[in-house]
Amino acid sequence: MRHALAAGLIGLVLLPVGCSCGDDDGAAPDGDADTDVDTDSDTDSDVDADTDTDDGACHVTPCSGHTLQCGDCVDNDGEGGIDSDDRECLGPCDNTEGPELNADVGGETGGPCKADCYFDFGNGPGNDDCHWDHRCDPLSVAPDYPPEGEDCAFEPGMVGGTDCPDAQSDLCLDFCMPLTPNGCDCFGCCNFEGVDHSVWIQHLGSDGEGTCTFDGVNDPVLCPPCTQVEACFNPCDECELCLGREELPPGCDPDEGSARCPDGGQPCGLEGDADCPMYSFCITGCCQEAPG
């Protein structure tokens, strides 16, 4: 169940040409070469940009002026699913359509061991006020988090401090929670259907490429276990879709939208569901506005 998106969210205005979901200057994340990101916010000539939202057409959904793989209306990985119809796409600010689950851009660490909202665009908490550090996770025994290469082992003294507050701000919750898939916390620690522990989907190999995939969620090297941050966590309720759960459990009515999207959002993702409106994206079964 998602934290409701507050009315009048500070500084967020939905624009017809893109969305501003990164750092205040709109720059690419620090340390990210950004060479694989299409910064042209114009739609390609072969993409249907019709404003009719219930015609089955794909609508380009840019993020911070960047058209990323999960918002470009292209089947980048050739698996037959486009953007929100591809289970590896976790939002329009995701630049890896698969098989990797890391975003490749978006809320990846702004510094060694640190994390902000994982599902938006940009490093650091400047636009979302979300704060966390992997050294506050007791499951971080002694992992390295490349490409920084710093030791992010658990440091109990940091728990409850500035980098790992007991509660996240309303701005963090209002901004990040609507973008966070069911079963995940705001920092990329996610539950998967059929997996008995949470995993960190952002993990990178020594080559800087993502290692966590749906096929690898039970491999602690590829998808390291993590402890979810309860202060910024979107649980997967009984009749909601979530990562690894692509059909509703028995007894759940697919026409009962209030059970699938308890905050009044538009259900999506199942056969017979209407398309999401333009400048919104289907995230684990519910239409969410692209971050403005």
Image (tube, rainbow, N blue to C red):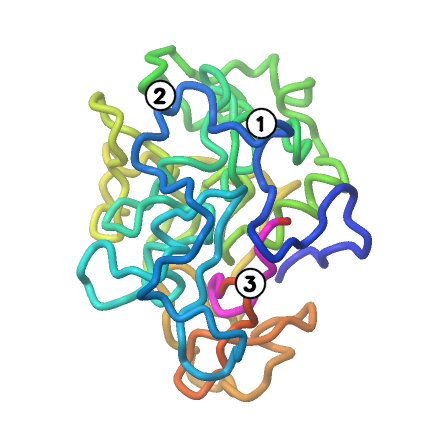
Q: Which residue is depicted at the point 69% across and 73% down?
A: 264
Circle 1 is placed at which residue position?
132
What secondary structure do most residues of the magenta stretch adopt?
A: strand
Give the percent coordinates (x, y) of residue 149. 33, 12
Q: Amino acid at mark 1?
A: Trp
Q: Which residues are magenta?
A: 282-291
When the figure is inspected, residue 183 is found, relative to residue 107, above or below; the finding is below
Report the number of discs: 3
Considering the numbered disc 3 on the image, is that residue within a helix, a strand or a loop? Answer: strand
Circle 2 is placed at which residue position?
145
Q: Closer to the N terminus: mark 3 or mark 1?
A: 1
Q: Residue furthest right?
A: 8
Circle 3 is placed at which residue position?
280
Q: Closer to the N terminus: mark 1 or mark 2?
A: 1
When the figure is inspected, residue 254 is found, relative to residue 227, above or below; the finding is below
Q: Calculate the distance from the C-alpha at mark 3 to the C-alpha at mark 2.
A: 32 Å
Q: Closer to the N terminus: mark 3 or mark 2?
A: 2
Q: Amino acid at mark 3?
A: Ser
Q: Quadrant of the N terminus?
A: bottom right
Badge 1 local density, few (<14 within 10 Å), some, or many (20+)? Answer: many
Q: Calculate the distance from the C-alpha at mark 1 to the C-alpha at mark 2.
A: 14 Å
Task: Report the side of 195 relative to 189 (left or right).
Answer: left
